[in-house]
Image (cartoon, rainbow, N blue to C red):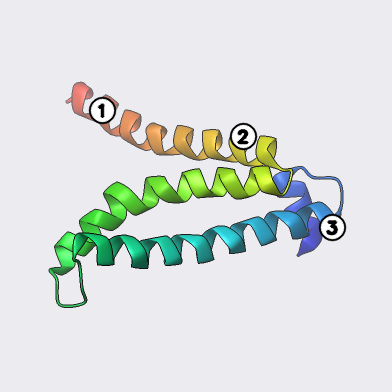
Amino acid sequence: MIEKLKQRWNVRNGWDVLIILVVFACTGFSVLYVKKWLFELIGLTKESSGWLRWGVNILIILPLYQVILLAWGLIFGRFSFFWEFEKRMFSRIGGLFRSKKAETKAE
């Protein structure tokens, strides 16, 4: 599994893979903490509308995750890796929307 991740992420050794996994873990825990704090701040509870909580997750928490991921990447000395990771991810997301626009224009 480590070898596959080394190849997929184009890193030199197992320590790089470990650091990247630690960054993802720290980001996940940080986002959970910030989400709890943010939901309390704006008054969202478990009784709040599921659609409202879902919307806040998409519009606020998802972009916040990206920023926190870069911050942890910087702290662990892997900012350039995570910056490239973010750019690839957003280009893939953008590609999904571009292909749908192309289909719409073709019709």
Q: In the picture, residue 90 is in which quadrant?
A: top left
SS state under label 2: helix
Label at residue 101: 1
Residue 55 is at least partly visible in this image: yes
**Distance from Cα at disc 2 to Cα at disc 3:** 19 Å
Q: CA distance from mark 2 to mark 1?
A: 26 Å
Image quadrant where residue 84 sits: top right
Marks 2 and 3: CB-CB under 8 Å?
Answer: no
- 54 shown above or below 88: below
Q: Residue 18, percent across and down?
A: 76, 60
Residue for badge 2: 84
Given this view, does label 1 or label 3 mark the residue nearer the observer?
A: 3
In the rendered structure, find residue 14 and report the number of the disc placed on it: 3
Mark 1 and mark 3: span between their CA atoms?
Answer: 41 Å
Q: Are marks 2 and 1 in contact (CB under 8 Å)?
A: no
* Rendered residue at 62%/41% (across/down): 82
